[in-house]
Amino acid sequence: MASTLKDVARLAGVSVKTVSNVVNGYPHVSADVRRRVEAAVAELGYRPNAFARTLRTGRVGVLALVLPDTDLPYADDLTREVVHAAGRAGYRVVVERGPEEEGSNSTRPMPVDGVLVGAPGETARALTAAGRPVVLIGGGSSDGSCDQVSVDVAGAAEDATAHLLRTGRRRIAAIGAYPSGPGGVPRSGTAGYHRALRAAGVTPLPGHLLPARHDRRADGYRAGRDLFAGPDRPDAIFCLSDRLAIGAMRAAFDAGLRVPADVAVIGVGDIEEGRYSRPTLSTVAVDTRFLAREAVARLTTRIGQPDTAAAEIIAPHTVLPRESTEVPAT
Amino acid sequence: MASTLKDVARLAGVSVKTVSNVVNGYPHVSADVRRRVEAAVAELGYRPNAFARTLRTGRVGVLALVLPDTDLPYADDLTREVVHAAGRAGYRVVVERGPEEEGSNSTRPMPVDGVLVGAPGETARALTAAGRPVVLIGGGSSDGSCDQVSVDVAGAAEDATAHLLRTGRRRIAAIGAYPSGPGGVPRSGTAGYHRALRAAGVTPLPGHLLPARHDRRADGYRAGRDLFAGPDRPDAIFCLSDRLAIGAMRAAFDAGLRVPADVAVIGVGDIEEGRYSRPTLSTVAVDTRFLAREAVARLTTRIGQPDTAAAEIIAPHTVLPRESTEVPAT
DNA sequence: ATGAAAGCGCTAACAC
DNA sequence: GTGTTAGCGCTTTCAT
């Protein structure tokens, strides 16, 4: 069917090794031979067999990006940037999503050269177990043992909350703020929210800290509805993701409230949707490109040199004020 | 490093072949041997090497899904469903997006068992060229030669336009309607739009058919802005995708218009965003699950039996009226 | 029912 | 510079 190194070698009248050398850009090949080989390659439409190569070298050319189905507001951006950054380094990316989609994934973890762990859990553990180099990306659970490129979630939450305070809000609720995360780890988002309130001398009201199971508009909607139906109606809501915020805004409208006049809303992630929503959504933008590039760089380095010292890098974030947190005209 | 068949064989005191048989569920193995082998497998944590197997069998266990960067309103849904359907059939999916992202993708097309072509173009051609089984999914360019599971784009456009007509609109513009598609093929969406207008005895106004380069909110915004700035302001807009529609709606607001009072808007795709936008977005929902399941079924069949007769299947769609096309209160 | 041995296409030693 | 050769881990005749 497909032609092999041997076919090319025969056609070019050289040995297999020489063809291999040419294909892999090995320098010590005479110009003449190189041309002959390249001609043969072109004529036969030869393409190297990735599997044979991998079998031989043990290198796969693939990185895994493990992402949660939930709780990562900037997941799509991050994926795009990781794929891009990995591509530039000669790697393909397989994205393993969420907690165990039944089927082939769990049955046979795809062989990879390294793993970017954006979410702890079974999938990550399975891939990691094989002894592959790992870089923690985005998430919070810092073992300190391996490379980590993280978002300062607490800082982002603090800045968002501070922004709300600065625009004169005081009854500030939070959505998506687990008391503790999936792994029992306290969600740093909550910490930042509290820190900002404390710094401003504001006491959070009971029932103003609402969990959200997933990063979905519907979850934000539910939480918002409960908030507006409750006794202490907030005048602002900090949402741990833009999608939650979109849901919360709709809950506000359905409750007959105006945004931002009656209640201000801010999210995290800077998804494009928020630039087109009504009102446009204030948010905390995370530098996903930075995240992706650094993480891929660390990982590829570690694949080459497994004994590199572990580093911890923090990606920058920025508050982006838009209509949803504007100070109402007096 | 990782243990191999040979290791297992030695530990179990049998031959390599026997272990292979057990691992692959070959029936003719005595119960006693089977148990011994399974114990050894468990003890060594043996996992078959996918590359060696592929090298030997020529089967990869991977399907490619080629998607355009543009013009596919339901791409995300479709991807999810395809991954799911493929997983149930024992296949992994690599998603190849858009026209040539430079880098590894184009350099070395990933080896796959079959290709789902959602977008014609270089990527698709490269994968197809290798002689792999192909199923056309969603798109319109029917060669008639290979399996095809399509969306009746023309029908969807016609139904959407008819819906607008039914709510009393007459000056109906369309966004995303190329005069001809990327491959020079006439876009059937335009055909459906015209068909509906003609059936209602309405003549489309010049300048009411706007192209959109990509399926992006920004493209919808631009087109909408041009439309509202032009001489013949439409009282309704049919958009070939929900994202375009979202952009068009914002253009309307920025132009000081109300939706649906001044202008009605309908999209295609039923993305979740449209259920939370203000106003909620009317749309044509495509049964992506159906699309995905049928396409994967056809493809896996064809991988097993290359000589199956080509079939053409049409996925159903439904108009979902929401606020953006409501009849204004008189 | 099980074993022995021959490769799948490629790369890496090692010769020349 | 270039050719020879020995496997990488697995499946698959062909024996037994």
Image: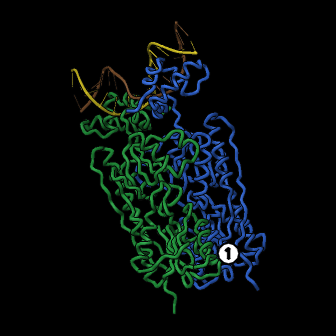
Chain colours: A green, B blue, C yellow, D brown
Given residues B62 and A48, the one toward you in this image is: B62
Residue under circle 1? B324
Residue drawn at the location 46% of the way across and 29% of the way down = B43
Choose top left, top right, bottom left or bottom right for residue A125: top left
User: Does residue A31 sit above or below A314 in this rendering?
Assistant: above
Q: Position of residue C11 (x, y in %)?
A: 33, 33
Q: Farthest residue in the bottom direction? A: A330
Given residues B35 and B9, the one toward you in this image is: B35
Residue drawn at the location 62% of the way across and 54% of the way down = B139
User: Does residue B316 sit above or below A154 in this rendering?
Assistant: above
Choose top left, top right, bottom left or bottom right for residue B328: bottom right
**Crowding near pointer 1: few (<14 within 10 Å), some, many (20+)?**
many
Residue drawn at the location 52% of the way across and 74% of the way down = A173
Name the subunit of mark 1: B
In what quadrant of the picture does the C terminus of chain B appear?
bottom right
Number of marks in the rendered image: 1
Which type of secondary structure does the marked residue at label 1 adopt? helix
Q: Position of residue A240 (x, y in %)?
A: 49, 67
Residue A288 can be seen in this image: yes
Residue drawn at the location 63% of the way across and 54% of the way down = B138
Q: Position of residue B215 (x, y in %)?
A: 56, 65
Q: Position of residue B168 (x, y in %)?
A: 76, 78
Q: Is residue A286 left or right of residue B152?
A: left
User: Does residue A141 sit above or below B170 in this rendering?
Assistant: above
Given residues B156 and A214, the one toward you in this image is: A214
Indicate the amino acid at tag 1.
Ser
Q: Is residue B189 left or right of residue A124?
A: right
